[in-house]
Amino acid sequence: MSNDSQGSVKGEAAMTLSPSGSASSQGPPLSPSTSKPQELPDELVQAGWSKCWSKRENRPYYFNRFTNQSLWEVPVLGQHDVISDPLGLNAAPAEGGDNNLGNGQRKRRVSEEQGGCNTGGVFVLQVEPTTPISPSTPGVKPWSSAPEEKQSQSTTIYWDLDIQTNAVIRERPPANHLPPHPEIELQRAQLVTKLRQHYHELCYQREGIDPPRESFNRWLLERKVIDKGHDPLLPSDCDPVISPSMFREVMNDIPIRLSRIKYKEEARKLLFKYAEAAKKMIDSRNASPESRKVVKWNAEDTMSWLRRDHSASKEDYMDRLEHLRQQCGPHVAAVAKDSVEGICSKIYHISAEYSRRLRHAHLSLLQERPPAVSPEQQRLVYCYPVRLALPSPAQPRVELHFENDVACLRFRGEMVKVNRGHFSKLELLYRYSCIDDPRFEKFLSRVWCLLKRYQVMFGSGVNEGTGLQGALPVSVFEALHRQFGVSFECFASPLNCYFKQFCSAFPDIDGFFGSRGPFLSFCPVSGSFEANPPFCEELMDAMVTHFEDLLERSNEPLSFMVFVPEWRDPVTPALSRMEGSRFLRHQLSVPAYEHEYRSGSQHLCKREEMYYKAVHGTAVLFLQNEAGFAKWAPTPERLAELLAAYRTSSSRASSLCSPGPAPPGDSIPMMQFCCRQAS
């Protein structure tokens, strides 16, 4: 198995080198009692294959002395062997065959057979290696898949994993992350659940409110932008300690949460509740006499007006509420500031303690310290998945069973689920990207860790977190690839990616399924990219800074097609900066309710719930350097194709999808800043 891993590393990381085979003098794992005469073609014999006899199974098998691989079936001519042929140069495609051949093979594409290209004076081969699944006894997958015909009839494909990357990076060393393990992932899930509960209790006890919707999830995203700690999920080394995102959202719900208003009576009740809550809060806190006087006078005046006037319209109530918020809001915020900062600080310090506890447990389980990270290399290569410096420990057993079209994976009583189509997708991504598990012995435990990680990050509430993990429609991805050469997603996950090359939040587990790591630490030299970030303001702002830095440094063709919500009241810093960037080549807007997103829970939801209408406009911006503009210019013809793809997607799914959850309070102008966070 170590030989297999070494061979795969050659095929992935050393893409600028010519293949070199490695021979082994080891004998077959099963010693046949009788050596049968050779009945194999000369080509297979020269490749190291021989026919042997299994005494235990009383049947012949085939053994390769170069790779130590054993097969029950006759080896296929031209089979891609990752040891003697790490780059797949000798893997001849079968005549008239399908892309997916027997023994887990993948037929090479024409683009792979045409060699490579010259990038920066270095010849780079345009292939990514695959690791075949061996059908020998130890490597048989411990689950049965549905027949191909049945799957093709019942499963809609929302990805294209055959598209090769055009993203070029400087070769990088293995990452210093601790390899995932179900025991640690289970502990992490329990601690994150406890932290969410602490947040809920602090908000209720100190401010008398429930936590703002999705605020904990956005806190995790905002903290990871600046976090220098070791845990992939829990923040532990952030400056400043007080989260701007969490502080802003909690303050927006004080003294009460302002929700969407449809009817006059709702507006009347909301106005009364706000006046009552503001008066009660200013009386119970250590406020200045001036603040106390202003708030009490405005609150009592509002209540008196409500008792006198019963003929006001909804607009009258909303105008009165806006006036009350302007008068009382600054004074209420002043008395709540210290308390809300205390909530943010306490949640952060609990998270840091949990992170230290998890790392100690993880290192104890591994019994090995991570090596020092070597410096980045200067050689240019096509981007490849994250590799870990530390080898993975032995993995515990994870049980798998299927309930209709849902795969259920269970570890220590904790079950995670994924539909059969996405489970097959994870198999393909793992085959294309993983180099240390050619027999899929660690596959199920890693899938369990992956699903558990994303389940924990986005919470367990109804539709919680799905908006933070939404994706563009398939037709839009097809147009982006066809018209603008896009082959890479800057913000995705193994569950919602369209291409097999993407950046994601968790390199320690996502790397086995194709992730190139977090985008803010990913530094491409050239390529065409799609960026649809989670709607967290701090993350989007950091994204723009990274775009500008990459475009400034590279003279190679580099292009980013950015999709962000068109929030204008007030405008977000990220959108404002991109609109003023010297790299902006074009900008267009897709109106609200006239386009859609793929659900963030697409790996679990029903087909009719796959798409939802966008409740806000989407701004599409093209950021390109000179070479990128020359190669992928947003011409009128290309833009027309992109908009047509949006229209096609929207009309096709209009009968299946419904508008996404409306953000609370969007009828109150002063609440727009908070509302867009919740969309």
Image: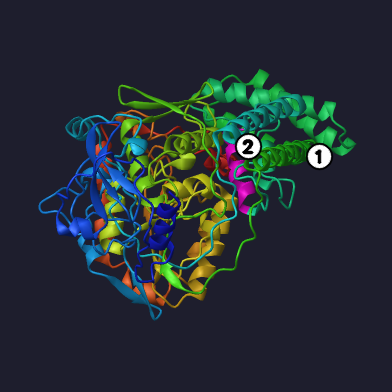
Q: Position of residue 119 (x, y in %)?
A: 38, 76
Label 1, on which residue? 338
| Amino acid on which disc 2 is placed | Glu
| Amino acid on which disc 1 is placed | Asp
Tag 2 secondary structure: helix
Residue 210 in which image quadrant: top right
Q: Position of residue 646 (x, y in %)?
A: 29, 49
Left or right of 208 on screen, residue 193:
left
Q: Is residue 528 visible?
A: yes
Residue for point 65% across, 40% down: 362
The mark found on residue 322 in the picture is 2
Left or right of 273 on screen, residue 605:
left
Alpha carbon distance from label 2 to label 1: 25 Å
- Whether 134 is among the magenta residues is no
Farthest bottom residue in view: 121
Pointer 2 local density, CA inside 10 Å: few below 14, some 14–19, many at least 20: some
Magenta-tinted stretch: 212-225
Circle count: 2
Compared to residue 578, the image places residue 218 above or below, namely above
Left or right of 482 on screen, residue 433:
right
- Whether 221 is among the magenta residues is yes
Farthest left residue in view: 96
Front residue of 129/646: it is 129
Compared to residue 444, the image places residue 461 above or below, namely above
Residue for point 37% across, 29% down: 605
Pointer 1 local density, CA inside 10 Å: few below 14, some 14–19, many at least 20: few
Compared to residue 596, the image places residue 643 above or below, namely below
